Structure formats: structure tokens, C-alpha cells
Amino acid sequence: MNEKITGNVEVECTDTTIEAVFLTESNFLGRVFVLGHSQDKECVSREIGRRTTSITVPRDKCGVETVQHGNGAGYTSSVNIVISFHDKFLTKVDRAYNITCLFAPTGDVVSYALTVQPSLLKDIQVLADQPSCEYEVFDVRTRRPAEVVHVNAPLEHVWTCDEANLGRYASLFQQLPDLFCMRVHDCVINEGKSKRRSKIINSEGCSLDTTRLPNIRYDNNKLSARVMSKAFRFGEDVAVEFECNVRLDLRNGTSCPRPRC
């Protein structure tokens, strides 16, 4: 990806808004948003298809910080804005700016945009790459991972993507709890000795055999999903193996889309 910003960021401050205008090297196809508010429609802009893009942020929303200075020195309003060259994901060429407007008591307005050192944005980029996901099947009666069970024994299939695996980024994850959406999809069953593979969850995340495996339920505000089933086997096979795929997308809205099964 060879995208980049050319020239300086143009900033215009008014009594009610802060506007930032960016000039890009080629037609812009991404988004501009206020850091930490990418789910709020008032804090996101998608002006695409041309070499200029902009965002207008309400001064009383989107986490804009206004500080009144003493001794008649006026006040400042500041906001952190990210320009991302992808509609959903953060990339290494994205940039963040701390934009500050100084409102002087004389009525003059001074504005400036400082490029944020990439550490904070880098943390978010790493965060987007780091969560690891795990699939486990539990014996409902013992609450332990199922290893050997009888046919018709109650089982719980659980998929989790654990923020604890983020290490030093865990605190950032807690600050941005709604960054990701999770979907389990394309699950197959390996049928023991026959080595036949049967798909049981399709690419949309819906069960193809609700008798054996009902549709998956997702936990609210968590990167986890689960479903109850009963142990089964095919013919004389004594071993049945499940394989599933888990997709994590950066959330683009107030809620995660769920499979419509």
C-alpha cells in the first residue's frame, strides 16, 4: 500500500466545530475518525473517491477536550483524529493528529495540527493483530474439556478470543472494548476412519444440521460464542473431530452483525 498524505493538514475552528482537511497522494478510499469514537456516526467521515478528504467534529461531542485558561487567556479545544487508508482495518500508513484550536479573548482563533508519534496508533495496530482465539468442547456434567464421552452426552462448544493474550496491550483493549466483531464460520467434522469431511457450519456462520449442532449464540460485549449439543458419531467410528474458523473484524458501527440463520 503506497498511500500517504501530502502537504499539511488544514484546520478550521469555529465556535461549534473543528474541521480537518487532508490531501492524499491518490484517491482516498478509507475513513477519518476521532480516536476512540470510530463507532459514533458524528465522529466518522467517509469522503472517498477523490484526493481530498475531511472531517468536521462537533466541539461538544466525540471526546473533544476544552480547557479554559485563566487570566483572560482564552480557551483551547483539542481532539485526536486518525486518517486510515482502509475502510475497516488500521494499517501501517495510517496517521494520527492532535488538533488544537486556541480561542483568544480578542476573538482571534489560532489552530495547529501536530502529528502524533506513532506509539498510540501503533498500539492499536498491534492490538488488531494480536487477539488469539481458542475452540474447546466441554463435558457439561464435569465442566471439563471433553476427551472421551458417550453418545448423547451433553456437550458445550465454546469459542473465545481472549484479551488476556494481549499482554501489555490488555489495558488498551479495556479502553476500546468494542473494537472487534467475532464470527465462527466454516466448521467441518472429520468422520474418523472414513476421513470424510462434512461441513456443519457454513461460511455465514449458520448450522447446516441443527439436529446435531444448533446455531451458535454470541455473548454480548465479549469475544466469545457457544452452543450446546449432544455427542454423536458416524457409523462405527469412535472418534469425531471438529474444525472451525473464527474471523475477527474491526467493528464498524454500534453493534456487531450476527448471522441470519
Image: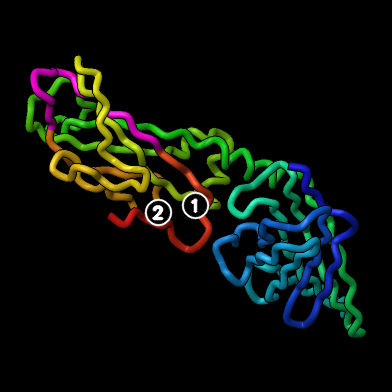
Magenta segment range? Answer: 231-245
- List x then y, in percent, for residue 28: 74, 58
Specify the label residue 221 is tagged with: 2
> Crowdedness of circle 1 by 10 Å Cα count: few (<14), some, many (20+)?
few
Under circle 1, the secondary element is loop
In the drawing, does residue 60 fall left or right of residue 149? right
* Mark closer to the chain start, 2 or 1: 1
235 falls in the magenta region = yes
Q: State the residue position of label 1.
A: 177
In the drawing, does residue 173 fall left or right of residue 187? right
User: From this viewpoint, is residue 80 visible?
Assistant: yes
- List x then y, in percent, for residue 256: 43, 56
* Residue depicted at 27% across the width and 35% down the height: 199
* Residue 201 figure quarter: top left
Q: How is the image coloured?
A: rainbow
Q: How many marks?
A: 2
* Residue depicted at 19% across the width and 32% down the height: 143
